């Protein structure tokens, strides 16, 4: 369950466990609970609509807590760890495609937030020359392959969209820049995955990565001519 306001205040004031250990334990426990299927459609362990609704409500709280935890980890300086853990949550990413729309919405927000953080971290590392470039590339690939399907297929809300127009445009730019820095074969993997899930939802035109796809096609033709 989501911790109380008093617990949050205590953490922000520096009381309790060391921030990173505390947050990592919370992330792992929340992801494990979500992964157990309490939030999937029809995933209630009891009988009747009341059990399903209870599971859905619990799932929405867990998903919202993940966003809060990600924001706090970044605020405390643990951006790399937050990004790596989200990139590695492939099982959760797969299950998210079956989640209730409200849960999907929360997970989209977590993904959008951490995609942006990953891009900022990559730019900062390039400027300073610090960190392991290969490790960052692998993490970026895992994150794109895990969470791009959710961005394409999530039910972004019929009443109020999860992300605003400017937020969507910003995230599209982040995704384009991230994909553009991958190796050609890696771009093919990511864009093939995007095209598959993007085409699955003809009513949605987001995230629109046609510019990245067109550039990859152009580069592919050039490579073919060279060989």
Image (cartoon, rainbow, N blue to C red):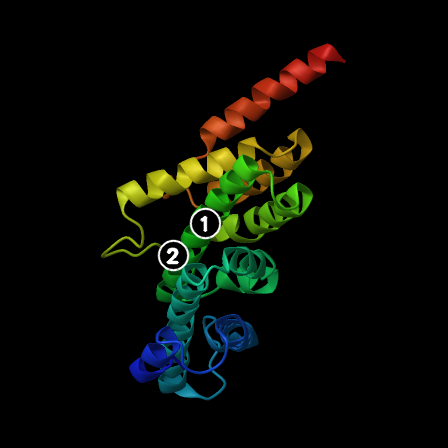
- Image spot of residue 34 (x, y percent): 50, 73
User: In the figure, residue 193 lies in which quadrant?
Assistant: top right
Say which residue label 2 marks: 109
Q: Nearer the viewer, residue 106 or 201?
A: 106
Relative to 34, is 51 on the left or the right?
left
Q: Can you say which quadrant of the picture contains the N terminus? A: bottom left
Crowd class of label 1 (few under 14; some 14 to 19; many from 20; radius 10 Å): some
Q: Residue at x 57, y 53 (%)?
A: 146
Q: Residue furthest bottom?
A: 46
Expressed as whole percent of the image width and height from the top left, the position of residue 219 reads: 61, 20
Q: Establish if 86 lies above or below 49.
A: above
Please give left or right for residue 183 compared with residue 164 in the image. right
Badge 2 crowding class, 10 Å Cα cut-off, few under 14, some 14 to 19, many 20 or more, is some
For the question of whether residue 61 can be seen, the reply is yes
For the point 40% across and 42% down, the residue is 171
* Circle on res. 117: 1
């Amino acid at each position: 369950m989501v911790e109380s306001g008093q617990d949050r205040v205590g953490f922000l004031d520096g009381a309790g466990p060391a921030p990173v250990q505390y947050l990592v334990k919370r992330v792992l426990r929340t992801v494990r609970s979500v992964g157990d299927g309490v939030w999937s459609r029809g995933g209630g362990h009891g009988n009747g609509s009341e059990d399903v609704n209870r599971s859905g409500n619990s799932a929405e709280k867990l998903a919202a807590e993940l966003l809060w935890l990600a924001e706090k980890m970044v605020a405390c300086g643990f951006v790399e760890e937050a990004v790596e853990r989200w990139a590695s949550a492939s099982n959760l990413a797969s299950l998210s495609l079956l989640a209730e729309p409200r849960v999907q919405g929360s997970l989209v927000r977590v993904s959008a937030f951490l995609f942006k953080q990953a891009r900022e971290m990559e730019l900062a590392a390039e400027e300073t020359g610090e960190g392991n470039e290969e490790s960052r590339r692998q993490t970026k690939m895992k994150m794109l392959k895990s969470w791009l399907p959710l961005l394409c297929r999530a039910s972004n809300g019929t009443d109020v969209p999860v992300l605003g127009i400017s937020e969507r445009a910003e995230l599209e730019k982040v995704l384009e820049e991230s994909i553009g820095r991958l190796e050609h074969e890696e771009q093919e993997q990511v864009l093939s995955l995007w095209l598959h899930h993007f085409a699955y939802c003809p009513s949605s035109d987001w995230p629109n990565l046609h510019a990245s796809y067109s550039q990859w096609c152009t580069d592919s033709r050039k490579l073919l001519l060279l060989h």
